[in-house]
Amino acid sequence: MRAHRIGLALVLLATASAQGPTAPDLVHGYNGEIILTSAPSRAESVIVLESRTNVSETSRQLVLVLQHVRGHALPADWSGRGRLLVSEGLAAIIGDDGTRRVFIFPEKPLPRPLMNWRDWESFGVFGIARYGERTPLTADHITALREGNGGQPAPQCDCDSGGPGSTQCSITAGGVGCSVTCSPPSYACCDWSSAGQPYCKCCSG
């Protein structure tokens, strides 16, 4: 299935609205160096952002692992300077070179701040996991995530946090952790690898 084009308009909200941090129209934006890689055999993509400013008090890095809807196109690899937008059930890249890519849950309406921008490539995803926000990941950990060897939970999706019926979970220890948001009927699963690394994913419901 080919990626399709959709229209959007961008007004970034710098602070949470009265609805709280999970408000559907809250969009966070980060400027920096972005690397997007995809692996068709796993139907996943990884976005690595090295931000120009702090993503948190302790890190300028944000790593997203996107699980793609089966049968949807995967994006071509890309790297460059730009802006990464993140909202609940949505991630988007605005490259300085004109690249426009949005990754979104199938059932999610576009946030109001993103309604009128044009010429975006849209890709359906059912899971968005976040890493590196508290403590930047090592190069080896990023490589493991790209290769699908991040120490994921067992195939039956035994979970330390999350589990059937959960659409979100997180796990952290010693400042290292991850979190994930999933589109039903998949469920969120967070666990630790045998090497002691956090791993967050969406499992089939």
Image: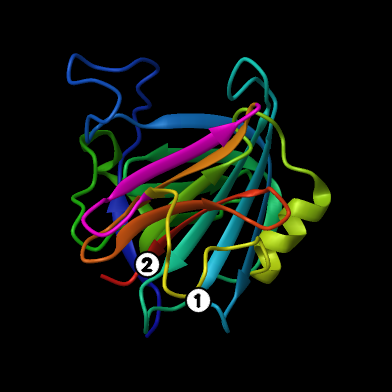
Quadrant holding the C terminus: bottom left
Q: Is residue 201 above or below residue 21?
A: below
Percent from the top left, x then y, of residue 34?
67, 46
Pick whichever, 12 or 149, lies toward us: 149
Percent from the top left, x then y, of residue 150?
66, 61
Question: Label 1 amino acid?
Answer: Ala
* Mark earlier in primary sequence (1, 2): 1
Q: Residues in magenta? A: 162-174
On the question of residue 122 being in view, the answer is no
> Viewed as shown, does residue 102 lie left or right of 31?
left
Q: Is residue 162 above or below residue 132?
A: below
On the question of residue 39 being in view, the answer is yes
Quadrant holding the N terminus: bottom left
Q: Which mark is residue 161?
A: none
Residue 112 lies in the magenta stretch: no
> Viewed as shown, does residue 2 lie left or right of 60?
left
Pick whichever, 131 or 86, lies toward us: 131
Q: Which mark is residue 43?
A: 1
Splitting the image into 4 quarters, where does residue 96 fall?
Answer: top right
Q: Callout 2: 10 Å neighbours few (<14), some, many (20+)?
A: many
Tell me the distance, in whole angstroms, between the alpha carbons under discs 1 and 2.
Answer: 13 Å
Q: Is residue 168 above or below residue 55?
A: below
Splitting the image into 4 quarters, where does residue 6 fall?
Answer: bottom left
User: Residue sitting at 76 percent across and 60 percent down?
Assistant: 143
Q: Which mark is residue 203?
A: 2
User: Residue sitting at 24 percent across and 17 percent down?
Assistant: 17
> Viewed as shown, does residue 67 lie left or right of 98?
left
Percent from the top left, x then y, of residue 83?
56, 38
Identify the coloring: rainbow
> Viewed as shown, does residue 80 lie left or right of 43?
right
- Mark 2, secondary structure of its residue: strand
Question: Label 2 amino acid?
Answer: Cys
